[in-house]
Amino acid sequence: MSEYYTTTTHNKGSAGHVLDIAPTPFFSDRGCHVRIIEEIRAAEREGYRATVVTYHLGKDVEGLTIYRSLNVPWYKKLSAGPSIHQFYLDVLLLWTGFRACWRDKPTLIHAHLHEGIGIGKVLSVLFRVPLVGDLQGSLVGELVQHHFIPKQGIIHNLFRAAERWLIRWPDHLVLSSDRATEGVAELDQLTVPATVLDDGVDENAFPPEAPGENLREKLGLPLDKKLVGFLGVLNEYQGVSVMLRAAKRVVEKHPDVVFVVMGYPKVEHYQGVAEELGLGDAVMFPGRIPYEQARDYLAACDIGFSAKADVTEANGKLLNYMAVGLPIVATDTRVNRSLLNDTALYGQVEDEVSLADAVCRYLDEPALAEEKARAGRRRVIDKLTWAAGGRKLVAVYAAVTGQKPPTKPQDTPRPPVESTGTPSLPSEKVA
């Protein structure tokens, strides 16, 4: 079996060594992966060293050790959502995790997503290290949203029982919101300690457009239009069809508006939906945006938009919108309210009329748009940065390992990658 990793050793991890289990094609420029990498960076700034165990697919991340499982050439899915292939991919990932633990002797295991908790529990027992589970939403909720299982019946009940079982396994749960276990257990019903760690943002990596920066010219975006931006996975639980119907209503009142719909995978499908709605040049689909370019695209827009319908999963894109100084229109969910508070205008879930009205209000009242944009940027800086999240996360690490939290954050910048993947785990051929 061939496995490989890329690494630059830049943080000796005086506080400890964390093995992050990511049962997903990490890194793939989407919200789930952004949260994982930002948690890792936040913990590293507090003195921890991290390595990641993940699938064979995905981009390498500068300065981060990544162990990848056996290359399965027929599986190339990078987009969000479940797949039948994940059953055997997770078995391969367990083996990769075993070998990583044997080699590196981690201080603790940080298991992301429900499948990661299952893999992490096996490794936790075998190597006698504590396990932190990290959930970004409900497993059953996601499977239903993606039409992988029915909304009710025997199969649904089996997955529900498995989810209830899995969330009891870690020594501590980290939740992306207080709704992350929705439909499985309320926080006060959990049998293990739980900490809500809201998504954060590096406000220095997502500044507003600077005077004279000319981002639209650089990116080929319209110079003479008002731009409403969306960045995320293109599927129905993100409310993309609702957004396009709202766009039609907005453009009818404001012909100088263009919606910039950034993301993947179903670009051609939603281009067809836009054409059927008669939107023509009023919607642009730049496709997949690398995370390192996300700030430029967002900062070039005038309004940030999210019609996300999932009421349990986090919505980290909103923090990026806030950081670059965009007034925001979002669906009125508890998750969104917890992030945005009163810094945004809201529409109802799956209601293009109320969402379109909110966009039009910003267009009609520029002073209100400026006020909300400034308030959002202030809120991010004051309450929602990963610096504060990192301290919260390492307090969890300290609790499960029985160590004291680091007293002095280590904010060492990441150096360039020294290697592109020639090392391998012992006695294995490089993929």
Image (cartoon, helix red, strand yellow):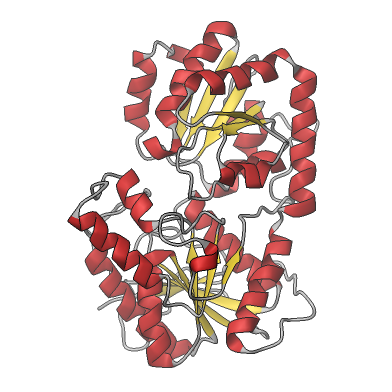
Residue situated in front as seen by the camera: 247 or 216: 247
Instruction: Give x and y (percent) for residue 91.
Output: 26, 74
Which residue is found at the position 41% from the left and 37% from the top? 234
Residue 297 found in image quarter: top right
Residue situated in front as seen by the camera: 305 or 48: 305
Residue situated furthest front in the rendering: 189
Residue 341 found in image quarter: top right
Instruction: Give x and y (percent) for residue 422.
Output: 42, 75
Residue 226 found in image quarter: top right
Which residue is found at the position 62% from the left and 21% from the top? 358
Which residue is found at the position 20% from the left and 57% from the top? 155
Q: Is residue 289 left or right of residue 268?
A: right
Question: Which quadrant of the figure contains the N terminus?
Answer: bottom left
Q: Is residue 150 visible?
A: yes
Q: Compared with residue 177, is residue 124 higher up or lower down, i.e. above or below?
A: below
Residue situated furthest left in the rendering: 154
Instruction: Give x and y (percent) for residue 410.
Output: 75, 74
Q: Is residue 235 visible?
A: no
Q: How many marks?
A: 0
Q: Compared with residue 99, is residue 259 higher up or lower down, i.e. above or below?
A: above
Instruction: Give x and y (percent) for residue 201.
Output: 66, 52
Q: Compared with residue 281, is residue 328 higher up or lower down, i.e. above or below?
A: below
Q: Compared with residue 365, is residue 121 higher up or lower down, i.e. above or below?
A: below
Residue situated in front as seen by the camera: 139 or 204: 139
Which residue is found at the position 71% from the left and 29% from the top? 214
Q: Is residue 113 left or right of residue 45?
A: left
Question: Which quadrant of the figure contains the C terminus?
Answer: bottom left
